[in-house]
Amino acid sequence: MLRRATLLGTLLLASVTHAATDLVARYLDNYPQQGELQAAEEAPVLTWTRELRGVQSVWVAEGERLTPRVLLSYPDDDGQLLGGLTLAPNGTWLAYVRGSSSNTSGEANNPLNLADPQERALWVVALSDGKPQRIAGGGSTPGNLAISPDSSTLAFSRGRDVWLAKPGAAIQPIRAFTIRGSIGGLAWSPDGQRLAFVNGRGAFSMIGVFDVATRQIRFLAPSIDKDASPVWSPDGRWLAFTRSSEPVQSYRFDQKADVVPWSLMIADTSTWQVATRWTADRGAGSAAYYKALLWSGNDELVFLWEKTGWSHIYRLSRTEGVPRAVTSGEGEVAAVTIARDGRTLYYHANTELRERYDLFSVPVAGGKPKELLAGYGVTAYFAPPALLDNGAVAVDAYTPREPGQIMLIGAQGKPRALVANATPSEFPAKELPEPEIVEVKAADGVVSRSLLYRPKKVGSGKVPALVYAHGGSRSIQTLRPNHLAGLVESLVMSGYAVIVPNFRSGLGYGLKFREAQGYGAAGGTDLADIVAAGEYLRALPEVASDRIGIFGLSYGGYLTTAALARAPKLFAAGVSIVGVTDWQMELELDAGGAPLPFRLTKRLELEELAYKSSAMADLSGWRAPILFIAGGDDQAGWIQEASQLGYLLRERQIPVESWVEPNGTHSPATHAMLRARADAALDFFERRLKQPKTTVTTP
């Protein structure tokens, strides 16, 4: 009889797991992703990338009606990513990069274990024929694409070189110059005769200007500081950039709320004299975290500043006065751009609701902001909206039950979806749960806002529950269906209650919350928010208090293992997806990826603090089973850490499972890998938290 009951439980579990896996499939297989939205400056043309089930494509919409069509497509789910989309100002051609990024050995990732090595290559394609031409590949990764104002020349960096290419029947790139250090921030002058760039030299960086005709390079007032974000005035007479003073011995988790203030610099391009136009105040806003620098049509600089503890838009005359706030209040401006006439700003901000970034416009001179897309949130809130030459605005936007799609807001303010039926009809939009926003108070008094998902049908019994810890930690979980975290919605539809805490050190809640004291490897204070979220679940009447689990991605993987170690009576199972488990590994590199030159005493102090902030410091109470999901070619998640922690847990006879992609990276390289990660996590929780219990024990 016992055997029959066990068999029945196994069959029931298999049925439940199959149904749950089907939900994951319907969700992830029908979730399209848009990105890289671009608008031509001189023509009614939009371009963007799209991915569905691993099929990557470039789309274009052009003409008076902006009729959309597929320009080119890569049908294989091979993990060779498409990005860097850059559209010529005249809207006749574009450039892009395809291929995975390189690992620490300089090898392009090969997620499918193909016999031949893969490459990351630069391509151009004319919108008239859709036939890509390969410009460069192999060796150093091409990047930092910039097309000249007359649409004749593509500039791109490759290692320590900058190259120039003129699209045509036979494209032959010409090396413009070679320089020490890294190259970024390529920016053409309005006349197309000069190219500004950022030259990184480790502890400092400089703004360089390359003269195309003479092939001479000029550096603008080089100093011991870090210069960035070069931007030309519309007439080319002035070149502005930011300058910040940063300590060489900088640790990733050092406090950056009150530092040596940053400055705005302006170079006169007729004499190349450089002057400091303005320096931020000490205290809030002294660090330039949100970087945006623009010229208005009124000879003013427009930039983001956290003077009030919130990121807002300010304007500053080139010649006199102090910055004036254009936006204000609680909430953050994440990205901003300016209309062709230089008089109107378009930006993304979460001033209406913290968990949703909306699209607004406001005059540069100031005034009441106008919300342009009510009912929709902006998907890529750090990417400025695309502005067309006819006054229309395009943005990738979502609703709580619909994935992102390209929305067009005409000059008269009426929005419309650019592509009909952009989301497949099989996507379970009507079944998606909409979360509640709840406030959760940690033991130390910090209040964080969380997204609480309750299963639609609770039934007569109590349900298992999960805490999901997002990656980052510098990110925010918004009110949108989420591709990478689509497991959350699938789990809720499968009968779990799920809470997603926006824990301290994340974005969206102001400077003080982001620069929280002692977060991460500096003390692990953010774990208190995760534990508080678990306690919130346990207090819900529909939740089975002994079946609460936790899972997290990347930084969230760290919080997962730390929670299992520090709150063993609360969490019954956990899944760490490409997660950090030992912060001591972070001590090997500074915030910029270079070896830390700390004095020995300081290093030992930080090493001890990092160790105590990690799960490794105390495994004595750990008792829950764990699943490690990792990529064998992950340069960020440190699979070595999972191996070490797994070994220590097995020594303590803790059940440890693992699922490793041999050539997987930090993010799932292919759609199949994304599905496999989700299926592995779901199967684990179905077995560990949802398995039917058999009580028939007759001999």
Image: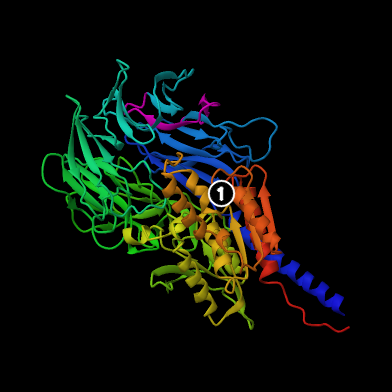
Residue extending farthest left: 320
Q: Residue at x 34, y 48 (%)?
A: 393
Q: Quadrant of residue 160?
A: top left
Which residue ends up furthest to the front in the rendered image?
601
Q: Relative to 500, say whether 191 is above or below.
A: above
Q: Indicate whether residue 133 is drawn in magenta.
A: yes
Residue 496 relative to residue 473: left or right? right
Indicate whether residue 324 is drawn in magenta: no
Q: Residues within 10 Å of mark 1 (few under 14, many from 20)?
A: many
Q: Nearer the viewer, residue 81 or 654?
A: 654
User: Residue most toward the top?
Assistant: 214
Instruction: Identify the coloring.
Output: rainbow
- Which is more toward the observer, 386 or 382? 382
Q: Nearer the viewer, residue 637 or 426?
A: 637
Name the amino acid, label 1.
Gly
Q: Secondary structure at mark 1?
A: loop
> In the image shown, does 352 or 693 lie closer to the viewer?
693
Percent x, y for residue 243? Answer: 27, 39
Q: Main secondary structure of the magenta part?
A: loop
Start and end of the magenta stretch? 128-152
| Residue 390, quarter of the rendered image | top left
- Quarter of the C terminus within the rendering: bottom right
Counting the numbered discs, the total is 1
- Mark 1 = which residue? 637
**Which residue sits at x=54%, y=26%?**
139
As displayed, is residue 276 above or below residue 282?
above
Residue 50 visible, this angle: yes
The quadrant the N terminus occupies is bottom right
Residue 327: percent from left, percent from top: 23, 56
Q: Is residue 204 left or right of residue 528?
A: left
